[in-house]
Image: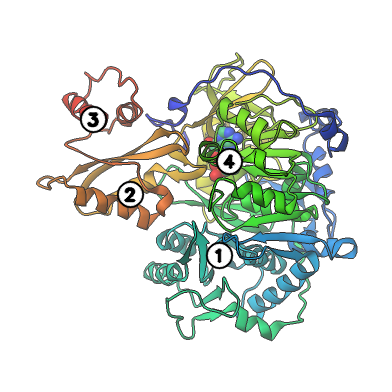
């Protein structure tokens, strides 16, 4: 059995079970302009036409050399898509648009401070800046095809410039979410063997200019202790030409990009002709064990898939202004702020700060100012905007044709507010279910073809064939019965492997239901997503949440094991257990139960120390709702911590029969503590 065994308390178990809702239909105006209106798409992408159907996606891109084989399964389940093809992602996102669209805006950068001007970067300017920075990476930093580089940057124009410069050279980028701590950044530097770190001095968050450069110094120091030397730290400046951090620059190691890049003004770099299956980037994500794993994404397959999803599901046309509120440091930002929209020559919006800063109308002012017509965000942001400004959208004159929700299940009530207030009853909505590992969407409605149903993600998108399996591997066909959602077939956006750990890749995503590990037939390798789901009679899937040790906090994916190991680094701590608890805005929050070592008095100081340790090791996003210092953990007779019981207590649910525990009396004590 694979890594993905079922834990005693999972998100799926505390999922809210909503009623089946009625359908909403797209307007004829939307359908009239949509990229994909032909219902035969589902026939074209049926399993009978697999894998050749996916050439339709690859042909949206410009290739140097056409592929020899659509899908090579000889190293199953590490799939090779469009094998033998040659392509460059930077070329496809920039150069190929220049002939007709060089003066069109590629990126609108919106600073958090409203008194600062919005920047509009044309495709031509993006081309110039990417080339010059690529020259710096090659000639100053000594990076070449196949090297890895870690990027720890906030939302800024310079972040996609950095990514696209790497892609131009065939350097594999590993972007770390800007809100992650230095220690989390260091782990990723070490795992990917990066000798160059790219950062920015500072950025705005909730009106404060945060010192970000300090994280680079700490990350480099921690990585060095683990044996990975970083010899260059490239520092972008929030205000070009001015240093906005108090942290000193280290001689010989650190340099300001804005100074060094002057030596490369006017330089042009020929894009590397990458093999389709060469990696484009790594994106680390949380899983069952403490160590985050690097999801390795390919160049040709990934780019084909995100381009097609952007065109067909996001309905992006080159004339659209598209705003995805995610952070580029997560997969959503990679696929649906940077690579997909730019490959389609759209204008993509990058917003530096918090959607509710300085007030609940900010997001709608941005939409109005830039004439945004496609909007993409997560339920957690929708809940927050609804809570603090339910009537704000109506005050602004923007019109969305299309909206996305992604990252967690959305409550039908919240969906309906999104539809009627944010979308003004005009916009279609797609609820897109997918993962870091999958590159692009798995389930969603095709907006001009399938009606919407609040609370349901929808059917598999064209070419994705989901199936719900029970613990024995049998298909669950009855509507409404929960099981493990899997995908029967590979698709071009699927990750290639876990960076440096093929076995972990196989164990985590495929071992559970694969009956023949030697098989080279894709039919033997259902992809295990790690979520529980139900299917209703119409073939729409409802995602219930994670079945493994992952908690989805405000759409951010956190490993319970990572939080527990951070807590265990505090010397007074004997045992730690994290359970998900439902939260009105964030969806879920981690609740942290701690048993202290014998003789240690439980105090508020210790609780704070533990909470701080979690923030230091991972980042503030992982801060526990509460640190409960309990006299003992509820345990089975064999000594296993019963997270199910703790989860029930945290969520005010039924703890069930606890009489078989080794220490049933402690359950009442903990319950009193939490209920107080
Ligand atoms: C959850 C984010 C319900 C799910 C793109 C998945 C969702 C995890 C949805 C992946 C959705 C994502 N409805 N749940 N529309 N989208 N999820 O890797 O549990 O950060 O496994 O990728 O988020 O999170 P990740």
Q: Is residue 336 visible?
A: no
Write down the residue under mark 4.
378
Q: CA distance from mark 1 to mark 3?
A: 44 Å
Q: Position of residue 146 (x, y in %)?
A: 63, 66
* Residue 604 relative to residue 511: left or right: left
The first of marks 3 and 2 along the sequence is: 2
What label sits on residue 676 in the rendered view? 3
- What is the C-alpha distance between the residues marked 3 and 2? 28 Å
Residue drawn at (50%, 51%) of the image: 293
Q: Secondary structure beneath disc 2?
A: helix
Depth check, mark 3 against mark 4: the one in front is 3
Does mark 2's beta carbon lie closer than 8 Å to ligand 1?
no
Q: Is residue 495 left or right of residue 342?
A: left
Whether label 1 touches label 4, CB < 8 Å? no
Up-down: is 136 above or below 385? below
Above or below, comparing residue 588 to residue 212 in the picture: above
Q: Nearer the viewer, mark 1 or mark 4?
A: 4
In the depicted structure, whether residue 275 falls above or below residue 257: above
Name the residue that disc number 1 marks.
Answer: 151
Residue position for label 2: 565
User: Does residue 606 appear to the left or right of 17 in the view shown?
Assistant: left
């Amino acid at each position: 059995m694979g890594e993905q065994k079922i834990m005693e308390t999972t998100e799926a178990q505390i999922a809210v079970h909503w009623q089946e809702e009625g359908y909403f239909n797209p307007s004829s105006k939307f359908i009239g302009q949509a990229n994909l209106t032909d219902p035969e798409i589902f026939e074209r992408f049926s399993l009978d036409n697999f894998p050749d159907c996916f050439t339709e996606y690859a042909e949206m891109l410009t290739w140097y050399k056409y592929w020899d084989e659509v899908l090579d399964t000889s190293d199953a389940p590490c799939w090779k898509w469009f094998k033998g093809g040659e392509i460059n992602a930077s070329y496809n996102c920039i150069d190929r648009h220049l002939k007709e669209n060089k003066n069109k805006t590629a990126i609108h950068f919106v600073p958090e401070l409203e008194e600062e001007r919005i920047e509009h970067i044309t495709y031509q300017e993006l081309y110039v800046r990417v080339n010059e920075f690529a020259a710096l990476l090659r000639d100053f930093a000594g990076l070449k095809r196949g090297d890895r580089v870690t990027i720890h940057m906030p939302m800024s124009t310079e972040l996609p410039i950095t990514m696209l410069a790497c892609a131009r050279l065939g350097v594999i980028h590993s972007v770390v979410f800007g809100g992650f701590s230095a220690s989390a950044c260091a782990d990723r530097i070490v795992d990917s063997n990066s000798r160059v770190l790219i950062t920015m001095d500072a950025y705005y968050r909730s009106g404060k200019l945060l010192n970000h450069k300090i994280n680079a110094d700490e990350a480099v120091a921690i990585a060095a202790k683990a044996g990975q030397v970083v010899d260059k730290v490239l520092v972008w400046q929030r205000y070009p030409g001015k240093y906005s951090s108090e942290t000193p620059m280290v001689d010989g190691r650190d340099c300001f990009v804005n100074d060094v890049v002057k030596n490369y003004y006017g330089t042009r770099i020929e894009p590397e002709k990458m093999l389709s299956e060469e990696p484009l980037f790594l994106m680390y994500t949380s899983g069952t064990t403490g160590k985050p794993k690097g999801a390795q994404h390919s160049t040709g397959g990934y780019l084909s898939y995100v381009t097609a999803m952007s065109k067909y599901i996001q309905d992006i046309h080159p004339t659209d202004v598209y705003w995805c509120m995610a952070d580029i440091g997560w997969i959503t930002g990679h696929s649906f702020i940077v690579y997909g929209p730019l490959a389609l020559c759209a204008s993509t919006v990058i917003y530096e700060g918090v959607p509710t800063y300085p007030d609940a109308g900010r997001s709608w002012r941005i939409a109005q100012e830039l004439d945004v017509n496609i909007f993409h965000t997560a339920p957690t942001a929708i809940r927050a905007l609804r809570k603090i400004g339910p009537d704000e959208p109506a005050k602004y004159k923007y019109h969305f044709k299309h909206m996305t929700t992604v990252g967690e299940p959305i409550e039908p009530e919240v969906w309906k507010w999104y539809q009627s207030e944010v979308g003004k009853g005009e916009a279609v909505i797609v609820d897109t279910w997918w993962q870091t590992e999958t590159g692009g969407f798995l389930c969603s409605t095709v907006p001009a073809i399938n009606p919407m149903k609040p609370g349901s993600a929808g059917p598999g998108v064209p070419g994705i064939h989901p199936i719900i399996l029970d613990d024995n591997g049998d298909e669950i066909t009855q509507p409404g019965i929960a099981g493990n959602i899997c995908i029967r077939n590979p698709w071009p956006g699927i990750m290639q492997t876990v960076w440096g750990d093929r076995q972990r890749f196989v164990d985590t995503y495929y071992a559970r239901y694969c009956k023949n590990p030697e098989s080279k037939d894709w039919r033997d390798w259902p992809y295990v997503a790690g979520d529980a789901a139900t299917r209703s009679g119409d073939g729409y899937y409802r995602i219930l949440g994670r079945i493994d040790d992952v908690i989805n906090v405000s759409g951010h994916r956190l490993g319970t094991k990572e939080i527990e190991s951070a807590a265990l680094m505090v010397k007074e701590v004997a045992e730690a257990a994290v359970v998900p608890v439902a939260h009105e805005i964030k969806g879920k929050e981690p609740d942290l139960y701690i048993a202290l070592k014998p003789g240690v008095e439980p105090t508020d100081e210790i609780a704070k120390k533990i909470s701080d340790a979690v923030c230091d090791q991972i980042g503030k996003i992982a801060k526990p709702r509460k640190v409960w210092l309990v006299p003992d953990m509820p345990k089975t007779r064999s000594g296993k911590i019963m997270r199910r019981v703790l989860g029930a207590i945290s969520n005010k649910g039924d703890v069930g029969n606890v009489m078989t525990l080794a220490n049933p009396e402690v359950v009442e004590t903990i319950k009193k503590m939490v209920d107080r």
